[in-house]
Image (cartoon, grey):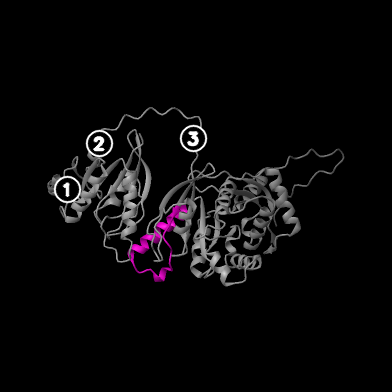
Amino acid sequence: MDHTVAIVGRPNVGKSALFNCLAGRDISLVFDRPGTTRDRMVTSARWDKHRFTLIDTGGIGIDDREGFGDAIAHEVELALAAATEIIFVVDAREGLTPLDQDVARLLRKSHRPVFVAANKVDGEKQANLDGEFQRLGFQGVYPVSAAHRRGLEQLRSAIVKNWKEPEEEAEQTERPKRPTRLAIVGRPNVGKSSLINTLMAEPRAIVSPVAGTTRDAVDIAYTWRGEPFLFIDTAGMRQERRVQDQLERAMTGRTAHAINRADVCILIVDAMTGVTMQDKKIAGLIQEAHAPCMIVVNKWDLAREQGDAGKTKEREYYEQVQQDMFFLSYAPVLFLSAKTGERVEGLLKTCATIAKNRTFRFQTGPLNRVISRAMEKYAPPLVNGRRFKVLYAAQQAAKEGSREIPTLLLFVNAPALLTPAYERYLDLQLREAFDLRGCPLRFIMRGRTTQSREQTRSQIKTVQPKRRAPKKGAAPKRDFSKRPQK
């Protein structure tokens, strides 16, 4: 039987901190403010031999002035419906509150095993603070401290006590395919969560007109035509000078981290406003991370209604996007509408193509011929009287732990002679010859070092030429060393 453990409770009792401890890694955003978590956070976890699904939820009964209380409550209901076991988190320092009792009544209706985790028992002095929670009538109360990782083993043991021993996993000849991680990034309120809901055909992420609805990087698994994907819905990134709230700074940091760990970044641009300065800054983060990318122009149905319909407007808009984001020239541009679902299917096709291009392998012969023809067609410029030369090129395997993108090792005469303009020229020539759509191309230069030339010269000086015997009849050489000094 597959087990799903849901973590619930009122706001600000430490649910997300406990979720990270039980998952064994920092997944959910932890911040000392009620209502930080809004969407469901779902991950796979393992305790000893047991594998299960772990769900973090928003606070039950939150008084949210922005109107997210009902949406958070609905997410909690979905989590409870999927759960086989429930961890009810309470605050041991504050004691049993009326809201805790309301949550307990809700959990009794679920008819699931409930384990009460009395959080914030940080030391021996607080060891007896969990006593009043016994009267809730659940299976047991377990004092824990998510901040100091105390009492977690007892809680785990109680939950898995009645679980069947897992069957020994048969040795798999092929490892399961890792899902392609797709980070959906952009400014606030451009339709990132709406796009995910349209792709999955269900309201998986909370959507509202309020900017900043999504606060954390939410991982959502999805399979399309046998291809596993993992969508990472991120918080919108505003200009840094406008960010005054510490929570929003933490949200921005989580989005930047999502860019670094993603296989493909999907940059969402609002068709009604066009490419803004903040869009360019987010694109700059993608470029610095050397991340494969595609640009999605959302709300195209609204922009088309206001302007001239037809492919002419789309072509002009495409050229403008290419001009504004020239440093992401490798990224394909797709026009769609998350609201109506127009051209959404094409997004997944493009993502699958980009994911395939990440593992592109160059054949050494054709690669060197393309570079040679490119340099014959347009010679590198002179730099201090010298010209850049590529002696040999080969593909370098990706380093373990780094993002896998096509990387070329170029053996050249001097790396300093390569100008940025000529590097872009070589990049374009290679893209015309090979299908690298959506993927950046990394060059690593290996030049002739000055040290090797000096070593060669010193070796030539140390080798003395052999003296030949004088020919017969030749005049003997005069020895000037014995000349008398004046």
Say which quarter of the image contains residue 47.
top left
> Picture quarter containing residue 486?
bottom right
Percent coordinates x, y for residue 241 in the rendering: 41, 71
Q: Amino acid at mark 3?
A: Arg
Q: Is residue 473 left or right of residue 120?
A: right
| The magenta segment | 232-260
Question: Which residue corresponds to mark 1?
Answer: 123
In front of the other: 40 or 256: 40
Q: Dot 2, how many residues are within 10 Å of its Cα: few (below 14), some (14-19), or many (20+)? A: few
| x 62%, y 62%: residue | 420
For disc 3, the neighbor class at 10 Å (few under 14, some 14 to 19, many from 20) is: few
Q: Secondary structure at mark 2?
A: helix
Query: Which sits earlier in the primary sequence, circle 2 or circle 3?
Result: 2
Q: CA distance from mark 3 to mark 1?
A: 44 Å
Task: Pinpoint residue 296: horizontal percent, then vertical percent.
Answer: 54, 60
- For the N terminus, give its image quadrant: top left
Q: Are marks 2 and 3 in contact (CB under 8 Å)?
A: no
Identity of the residue furthest to the front in this view = 109
**Dot 1 lies on which element?**
loop
The answer to whether residue 366 is left or right of residue 9 is right
Dot 2 amino acid type: Ser
Q: Which mark is residue 175?
A: 3
Tag count? 3
